[in-house]
Image (cartoon, rainbow, N blue to C red):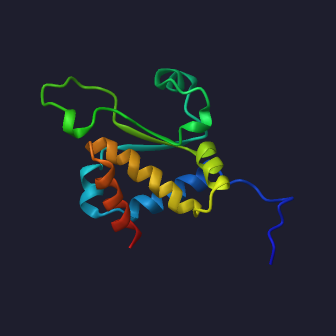
Amino acid sequence: MSKDWQTAEAPSLQDFEALATDAWNKLPAEFRNMARDLLIRVEDFATDDVLDELGIEDPYDLTGLYQGVSLDKQSVLDVARDPDMVFLYRRPILDEWAAGEEELGHLVAHVLVHEVGHHFGFSDDDMESIEAEAAT
């Protein structure tokens, strides 16, 4: 059966939130417990201020962002600040998905793990290990 592309709609922000929740629930429990105060938000694009701060001209070049102070850089002497947040950007993720062969849920999980990994100050190898464990 072929897809009717005339009436097809892109996954909504709510659809992405469901994919992110599913990906979050598949992460190892100890990983989720250590990041329980982390806020996860889904938005269409990063704000112009964020893109400018990062020196990114094309908003499609940023699929996700960790905003905060990673656990490996926090100090008990730190003053209260905004909560640590992970942003998943729907439109750039959809663009990457459309250009490749990766399943959308897997791509959302990949971006989520990568950005949450920044919260911990993890290396790319650490993040790949966590992502592999979540995929089983």
Residue 69: quarter of image: top left
Residue 33: quarter of image: bottom left
Image coordinates of residue 63 in percent, x first then y, are 53, 43
Residue in the foreground of this view, choosing between 42 and 3: 3
Q: Residue at x 34, y 28 (%)?
A: 82
Q: Is residue 59 above or below residue 105?
A: above
Q: Give the quarter of the figure containing the C terminus.
A: bottom left
Question: Seen in the image, is 81 located left or right of residue 48?
Answer: left
- Whether residue 34 is visible to the viewer of this picture, yes or no, is yes
Question: Seen in the image, is 32 located left or right of residue 51?
Answer: left
Q: Residue at x 75, y 55 (%)?
A: 9
Image coordinates of residue 102 in percent, x first then y, are 58, 62
Question: Seen in the image, is 126 located left or right of residue 50?
Answer: left
Question: Seen in the image, is 100 located left or right of residue 52?
Answer: right
Image coordinates of residue 77 in percent, x first then y, are 13, 25
Q: Residue furthest bottom?
A: 1
Q: Residue at x 44, y 60 (%)?
A: 23
- Whether residue 11 is visible to the viewer of this picture, yes or no, is no
Q: Is residue 10 above or below residue 56?
A: below
Image coordinates of residue 70 in percent, x first then y, are 27, 37
Q: Give the quarter of the figure containing the N terminus.
A: bottom right
Q: Is residue 120 above or below residue 48?
A: below
Q: Residue furthest right?
A: 6
Q: How many marks?
A: 0
Q: Residue at x 62, y 55 (%)?
A: 97
